[in-house]
Image (cartoon, helix red, strand yellow):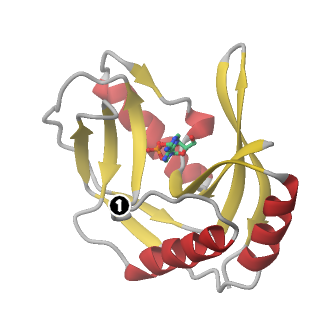
Amino acid sequence: MKRLFFALWPEQNTRQQCATLINQLNQTGKPVNEANLHVTLLFLGRISAEQQAIITREAGKLPAPLITLRFDRLSFWKKPAVLCLTAGQFDQSVSILNENLARIAKQQGIPIENRPFKPHVTLVKKASSAIDFDFAPILWQTIGFCLVESCSGPDGVEYRIIQRWPAI
Ligand code: 2AM
């Protein structure tokens, strides 16, 4: 069983801007590796090969809209103890994509969190407090969405893209 999630993957330029911001923040905690930066669309957890096959097939039928997110806030979320980029306002097409993916997952009996979807980019884990930091908003333009495997290794977690659905 693989541990999977749907995500928006950044283009190189966007990834670089996020990585630069992480360096500037210079926070205690655990900075996210540059290669792992992403926006989670839907976390699936451990699912079977059969579930994966059906979900992959159904996800392929969804429109993959072009989405531009403007991350203009640095938020501290106390419970997961993360510093993340959030958007004051965001394109509803990303919420629709999240809802469609959640519907597909629920049809396969996968439990999905009920919390409202809030697009974000985790920058620092194990963070201890909010910080005040001015930065230029980061534009995140998607080139579709992807299914990603979370792999734990000796050097920490590594995310591997299993499948991409390009934007139309
Ligand atoms: P994040 O999106 O807030 O950074 C893979 O584990 C990714 O799925 C992580 O980036 C993680 O957090 C996100 N995620 C969302 N819900 C999760 C959950 N219940 N357990 C683990 N990871 C989750």
Q: Position of residue 116 (x, y in %)?
A: 33, 64
Amino acid type for the residue under numbered disc 1: Lys
Which corner quadrant holds the C terminus? Answer: bottom right
Q: Quadrant of residue 56?
A: bottom right
**Is 141 placed left or right of 57 in the picture?**
left
Residue that appears at 32% across and 21% down: 26
Q: Quadrant of residue 52?
A: bottom right
**Is the residue 45 above or below the residue 56 in the image?**
above
Q: Position of residue 19 (x, y in %)?
A: 47, 36
Which corner quadrant holds the N terminus? Answer: top right
Q: Report the front residue among 122 and 26.
A: 122
Q: Report the front residue among 162 and 57.
A: 57
Residue that appears at 64% across and 67% down: 105
Residue reaching furthest to the left: 132
Q: Report the front residue among 97 and 106.
A: 106
Would you name the residue on which mark 1 appears? 118
Secondary structure category for the residue under label 1: loop
Q: Report the front residue among 146 and 74.
A: 146
Q: Position of residue 30 (x, y in %)?
A: 43, 20
Q: Position of residue 55 (x, y in %)?
A: 75, 69
**Is 151 placed left or right of 132 in the picture?**
right
**Is the residue 156 above or below the residue 59 in the image?**
above
**Is 161 placed left or right of 29 in the picture?**
right
Neighbourhood count class around disc 1 (C-alpha, 10 Å): few under 14, some 14–19, many 20 upward: some
Residue that appears at 42% across and 41% down: 122
